[in-house]
């Protein structure tokens, strides 16, 4: 075993050594001997050691070049490939269909990673990521506390929360607690006749001024007269005085359908 390197604050590195938490991540992904797993940010390889013992093959993508070079010495396994790369530029289509993602990721990576995994033509069947507890709760939020992040995640995935992991179990400990976020890819679109591009065009406009009413935010975000937006909201069965965070996925769907029908 090589010497343990210092965690780099600039890369958001916090080493997790707690066996129960690492096991919970593998269990949340239901890893079997037939699975191919993409691990993101393996770090010192504590999670990697569990994965190579349970899965058919592991591809570990590590941005830190020192860690990527030393990982094969830390975890000696014939079913492990280490890739030194930024996961946001990784080619997800290089993975076999039905692969799974398991990762203890830097907090700053969360939103971009969920977006990239959601939009790739070859998404994982399941993604289990350990992230900041507050952000995990935001991703899984119900109408009333929704955000673009929760809408994005939930339109593509069935979202649930797993084990909470206290900050004290990391080295060095982060300032906040973490939680396992479980994303199970939807096997079919949530809605019939669904245009994802139009859907998110309307959603982004609706959240462009999230402290304002849907009437005002959609009017500004879509550069349309308020009378037009009010009429569209009425057609979609939505009170124009509501705010974006109160709308459900279905509400956004009907708004996007009305938008498509009138543009």
Image: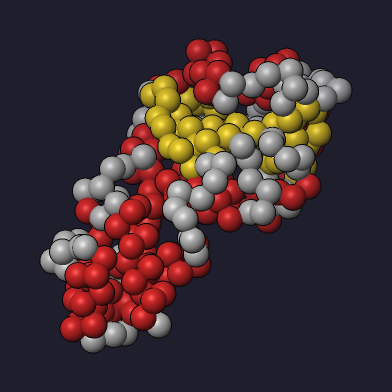
- Mark yes or no: residue 6 visible: no
To which quarter of the image does residue 206 belong? bottom left
Above/below status of 150 relative to 49: below
Residue visible at 40% across and 82% down in the picture: 263
User: Of 111 and 205, which appears nearest the observer?
Assistant: 205
Indicate left or right for 82 with 216 as reference. Answer: right
Indicate left or right for 225 with 60 as reference. Answer: left
To which quarter of the image does residue 139 belong? top left
Above/below status of 24 relative to 100: above
- The picture places residue 37, in percent across and down from the top left corner, at 70, 31
Name of the residue lying farthest toward the top: 20
Residue visible at 57% across and 41% down in the picture: 187
Q: How many marks?
A: 0
To which quarter of the image does residue 44 belong? top right
Indicate left or right for 167 with 196 as reference. Answer: left
Residue visible at 72% across and 26% down in the picture: 35
Q: What colouring does the structure picture have? A: secondary structure
Residue visible at 26% across and 55% down in the picture: 247
User: Of 174 and 84, which appears nearest the observer?
Assistant: 84
- The picture places residue 159, in percent across and down from the top left corner, at 43, 37
Viewport quadrant of the N terminus: top right
- The picture places residue 66, in percent across and down from the top left corner, at 73, 39
- The picture places residue 189, in percent across and down from the top left corner, at 51, 50
User: Of 180 and 205, which appears nearest the observer?
Assistant: 205
- Mark yes or no: residue 186 visible: yes
User: Of 179 and 259, which appears nearest the observer?
Assistant: 259
Indicate left or right for 51 with 180 as reference. Answer: right
Name of the residue lying farthest toward the right: 78
């Amino acid at each position: 075993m090589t010497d343990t390197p210092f965690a780099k604050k600039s890369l958001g590195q916090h080493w997790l050594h707690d066996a129960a938490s690492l096991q919970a991540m593998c269990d949340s992904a239901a890893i079997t001997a037939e699975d191919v797993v993409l691990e993101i940010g393996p770090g010192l390889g504590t999670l990697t050691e569990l994965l190579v013992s349970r899965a058919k093959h592991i591809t570990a993508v590590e941005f830190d070049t020192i860690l990527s070079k030393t990982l094969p010495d830390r975890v000696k396994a014939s079913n492990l490939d280490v890739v030194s790369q930024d996961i946001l530029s990784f080619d997800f289509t290089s993975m076999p269909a039905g692969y799974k993602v398991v990762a203890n990721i830097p907090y700053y990576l969360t939103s971009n990673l969920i977006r990239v995994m959601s939009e790739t033509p070859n998404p994982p069947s399941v993604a289990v990521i350990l992230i900041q507890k507050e952000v995990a709760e935001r991703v899984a939020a119900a109408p009333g506390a929704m955000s673009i992040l929760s809408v994005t995640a939930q339109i593509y995935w069935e979202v649930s929360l797993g084990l909470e992991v206290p900050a004290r179990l990391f080295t060095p400990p982060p300032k906040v607690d973490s939680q396992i976020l479980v994303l199970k890819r939807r096997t079919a679109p949530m809605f019939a006749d669904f245009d994802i591009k139009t859907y998110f065009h309307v959603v982004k406009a609706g959240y462009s001024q999230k402290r304002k009413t849907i009437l005002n935010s959609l009017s500004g975000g879509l550069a349309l007269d308020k009378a037009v937006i009010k009429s569209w909201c009425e057609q979609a069965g939505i009170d124009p005085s509501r705010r974006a965070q109160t709308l459900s996925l279905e509400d956004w769907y009907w708004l996007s359908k009305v938008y498509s029908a009138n543009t």
